[in-house]
Image (cartoon, grey):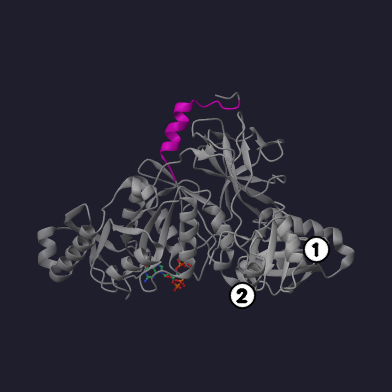
Amino acid sequence: MSNEQSIPVLQVLNEAGRRRTFAVISHPDAGKSTLTEALALHARAITSAGAVHAKGGRRGVTSDWMELERERGISVTSAALQFEHRGHVMNLVDTPGHADFSEDTYRVLAAVDCAIMLVDAAKGLEEQTRKLFAVCRHRGVPVITFINKWDRRGRNALTLLEDIETHLGITPVPVVWPVGDAGNLRGLVEAENTDQMLRYTKVPAGTHAALEEKLTADQAVEQEGEEWANALEELELVLSSGPGYDQEAFEEGKISPVFFGAALTNIGVKLLLDAVVDLAPAPGPRPLAKGGAREVGEDFSGLVFKIQANMDPAHRDRIAFVRVCSGVFERGMNVTRAASGRSLTTKYAHTVFGAERTVVDTAYPGDVVGLINAAALRVGDTLYTGKKAEFPALPAFAPEYFAVARPKDISRSKQFRRGVSQLDEEGVVQVLVSDRRGDQAPVMAAVGPMQFDVVLHRMEHEFSSPITLDHLNYRLARVTDPAGAAEVGKSRLTDAEVLTRRSDDVLLALFADKWHLSAFQRAKPDVLLEPLIATA
Ligand code: G4P
């Protein structure tokens, strides 16, 4: 044990063993906020009760750190909600709701051990869900599926499962099956306990939790006749044609346990929460950049997966969110930033969800800590005490939108440069530069166009340097090397250029579209052009 750590290793292992750190991935409107609220209500919230982003007229927290967010009614903040369930500590890491903030969402997936894939029963697999699933697969994050809104008319359960299998290439294994079609939800039956039906009845007041009663199989036959028989038949059909539930296959991403329910009326939510406790893996060893792994019981290490400025406009602060990977985090301890070898103190450590903050004194593997005003930190940083640890760089995603940023007022070039580097460090956009374009005309690269709105807003209001953005006609980026960059530069293909990504000095060749890319590849088959992680 290091001299920094006053807590015995056995206790660290115990605490880590009862942590479940997960995120909900979904397409906007599938019900993520509703499910988050329902999960938190089931559990005893440790830091805040049901603090979920404000939308419509529902209760919400003041996470509107930007006017932009208020105007659009979306949540662009991201932090963690911690609550207890059955003696376990659940860390639900929030993901931004809007599709264009997906780059943040992708990084959140580096900080969790499991994801709940939320699917709208009527809409099935939607674009954003597929993209996020692809990232889970890439990162080896196991996925639990929750098919939501079964209280409304929707698709057939067997068809939905078939879609998951065909389009995602993962075998869905039902743990819970619905009794009654979508829109006629009578109840649920558990695959492991078909002697019992959980029946739900709506309460007249509408959006409140439905009443649950347990029926024996005989009662279910008598009272729910055909629906019950159909449910058992379909469940049997799916289970007999598949491999069945297997923990190893789940953790390896080969199968996804499937649940049905309706988050709005709390149907199926407790079963889902139980599954997170019973099936989702506890924090485990984390691979290191140079090989080997950091074991959970070793000295403290943590991964900075998100940096957020101005969550509280009154304070103009900057929070670095750190997922504890090993050891114990104790507030006030000195930690080393692997990238620079410099140490920093962690006097201001909080847990944050929305605008609520609670000082955190101790955190264990799986927990998320917000370090306030830790200016030196960057997204992807590793922090550690004792033996050095450095985790692999977070993947950068393939940007599809490019725009040149220029200060409106050139006398404010200092503010301009400061703002651009801050946004780059936070990962709000990727900042690309070249000698030809110069420092005063960096290219902003984004996965979704809304990232640009954030840039415009923050440059003006936070850094006092309003900018213009001139959109460029590129849609594709490929990683290349200096030789490749020279070839692209020489090419007669005018719709291409190479820029350096500032955060890691990677050379990115930009092309207008796949036709121009393949024309270039045909002409120069030896040039290195590696795809980034595609989100499409
Ligand atoms: P999101 O965070 O994924 O974007 O979705 P959110 O929870 O805001 O839910 C989107 C809409 O779907 C909301 O309705 C919500 O009430 C509804 N919803 C979520 N879960 C269920 C469910 O299990 N059953 C039914 N029937 N509806 C569900 P809205 O009218 O668009 O929003 P609001 O005005 O109620 O806030």
Residue 11, by quadrant, is top left
The percent position of residue 218, horizontal first and vertical second, equals 9, 60
Judged left or right of residue 155, residue 362 is right
For the residues carrying marks 2 and 1, which lies nearer the camera in this image?
2
Judged left or right of residue 7, residue 373 is right
Q: Which quarter of the figure is the N terminus placed in?
A: top right
The kind of secondary structure element at disc 1 is loop
The percent position of residue 490, horizontal first and vertical second, equals 77, 67
Is disc 2 surrounded by few (<14), some (14 to 19) or many (20+) residues within 10 Å?
Answer: few
Residue receiving disc 2: 515
Task: Please tell me whether residue 15 belongs to the stretch shown in magenta.
Answer: yes
Residue receiving disc 1: 464
Is disc 1 surrounded by few (<14), some (14 to 19) or many (20+) residues within 10 Å?
Answer: some
**Between 327 and 273, which is closer to the camera in this rendering?**
327
Judged left or right of residue 49, residue 415 is right
Q: Would you say residue 118 is visible in this rendering?
A: yes
Q: Would you say residue 58 is visible in this rendering?
A: no
| Upstream in sequence: badge 2 or badge 1 | 1
Which residues are the magenta region? 4-20
Q: Residue furthest right?
A: 411
**Between 15 and 433, which is closer to the camera in this rendering?**
433
The percent position of residue 67, horizontal first and vertical second, equals 66, 67
Query: 312 above or below 86?
Result: below
**Between 168 and 116, which is closer to the camera in this rendering?**
168
Q: Which residue appears at 46% of the width and 41% of the height?
A: 283
Query: 387 above or below 120?
Result: above
